[in-house]
Amino acid sequence: MKSKRFVIALIKHETNTFSPIATPLSAFGHGNGPSYGKDALAAFAGSNTPFAAFLDIARREGAAAVTPVAAESWPSNAATRATFETLLQPLEAAVRAGCDACFLDLHGAMVVEGCDDAEGEILRRLRRINPDLPIAVSFDYHTNLSPDIVANASVITGYKTYPHVDMYEAGLLAGDILARSLRGQVRPVMAWGWLPLVSSIMRHAPEDGPSGDILAYARAMEKSGRVLAATLLPGFAHADTPYTGVSAVVVADALADNQAQAAAQEVCERMLAIAWERRAEYAFQPEPLAQAVARARTLGASAQAGPVLLIDHCDNCGSGGTQDVMLVVEEILRQNLDDVAIAPIRDPEAVAQMVEAGIGANVNLLLGGKTDMPSIGLAGRPLRISGRVRNITDGEIVFTGPMYTGLKSHLGRTAVLDTGRAQIVVTERHHEPFDLVIFRHCGIEPTKKRYLMLKSRIHYRAGFKPIAAHIVECAGAGVTNADLSVYRYRKLARPIYPLDAI
């Protein structure tokens, strides 16, 4: 009996259409470019990702795993059409060569030149090659779901955690449903819905707003067997598209229940009803920056087990930020917080100066502020700062978890500037600090510091929340601002809450 052939691919980008950061082909692979074929398999096998789960499904089913491309970039502005075609063509070729099923690890908020719905285009083009191809897709929690995505996928699941520590599980669920359908054990049908609600990412975490109750209901419906999968997708507010909003998608088994479509629809509508009834809770109310830093200073003055975290959430590269806005750092230094570690500031020029000076040298830098943000009318403003070069590394790291456990990543050359009160990790490349290795690889033990400032929003909670004594959110500036009024939306479906009175 001929073994099955499964095509497994990863193409991921969360596109912040307001970001000034370009997305060249080299950005996929976090600076090293995409992986193809056996290199793609080797890069992600055994990791906490849907791609790895799909590989395990193929192994379980005795199928040959064909891995044409694995490409993921930090969030930034839209990629060019040429870059998109370079990523998509190997996948199209693999499907054209023939396969029994396709398993896709996609993001769900990817915009490319000339297309506001890149994932929808990927699925449409695969359908044109093989109209009957079974396709399972695992999506990021921040998906902006479109009609074309649902119409062209056989099975859809998404993460139920934020930080995303269940990526493997989400992929395993999608892959298992599709594999069972190939064996004739289930017949998946889907229902979905979308709300005119653009929600603040600062309110997406299950413990912070309505999402927790919605996800608990979704899990209960899955556990009961009423549906095979129920997924909430709170959306990505920094992508200006007609599809941006809160959505849900539910998969049920029409083989076991002739009312499966109705059951899926009912579960989907209940999930969205909770979100709409509690839509005001998806808005974020920031504390003034000086007040937040003063509060952190007071919290850090008392005896404690673990550091106080200061979260610079308006400039998070994990949502498309430049990672060089110095407003929060400046306020921390102005208020004389002591025993602070800060990570990371992206500034290749400053890194080059420190590398040239060498470890132990005293340097005077214009740090950060190298990037203008015309979409929100914000000019870059460097911070004049002096200190000693404490350490220099190549920036090659391996995540210790629980996010992306086991994967390698690349900060570029990295240098630590010690001002006396603060140790600042400066990198050549963007990187969100969700893993303690960001500090540990360059000789800083984060558990021993009084304060940690992190350029993150929610993902920091994966690695840093367990060690924190207190957490203070600091509203600085940047293209990941939680205040949606700073953005000039042009493509959103209007009216939409909270920008319009509905």
Image (spheres, helix red, strand yellow):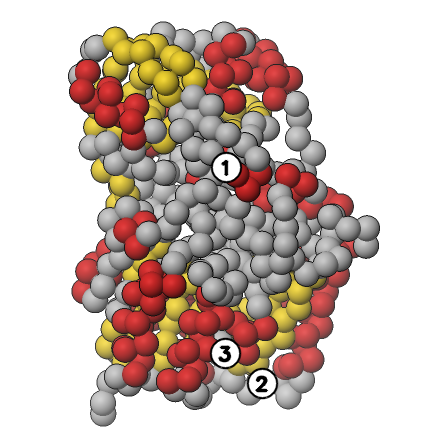
Q: Earlier in the sequence, mark 2 or mark 3?
A: 3
Q: Secondary structure at mark 3?
A: helix
Q: Secondary structure at mark 2?
A: loop
Of discs 1 and 2, which sits in the foreground? 1
Residue 8 appears at what percent x and percent y? 32, 70
Q: Which residue is mark 2?
A: 254
User: Which residue sits furthest right?
Assistant: 501
The answer to which image quadrant residue 215 occupies is bottom right
Q: Which residue is mark 3?
A: 152
Residue 453 appears at what percent x and percent y? 46, 24
> 123 left or right of 219?
left
- The residue at the point 53 percent across, 58 percent down is 143
> 278 left or right of 2?
right
Q: CA distance from mark 2 to mark 3?
A: 18 Å
- The residue at the point 64 percent across, 81 percent down is 261
Q: CA distance from mark 3 to mark 1?
A: 36 Å
Q: Secondary structure at mark 1?
A: loop
The answer to which image quadrant residue 176 occupies is bottom left
How many neighbours does mark 3 have within 10 angstroms: few (below 14), some (14-19), or many (20 or more)? Answer: many
Amino acid type at image mark 2: Ala
- The residue at the point 55 percent across, 12 percent down is 297
Residue 400 appears at what percent x and percent y? 32, 40
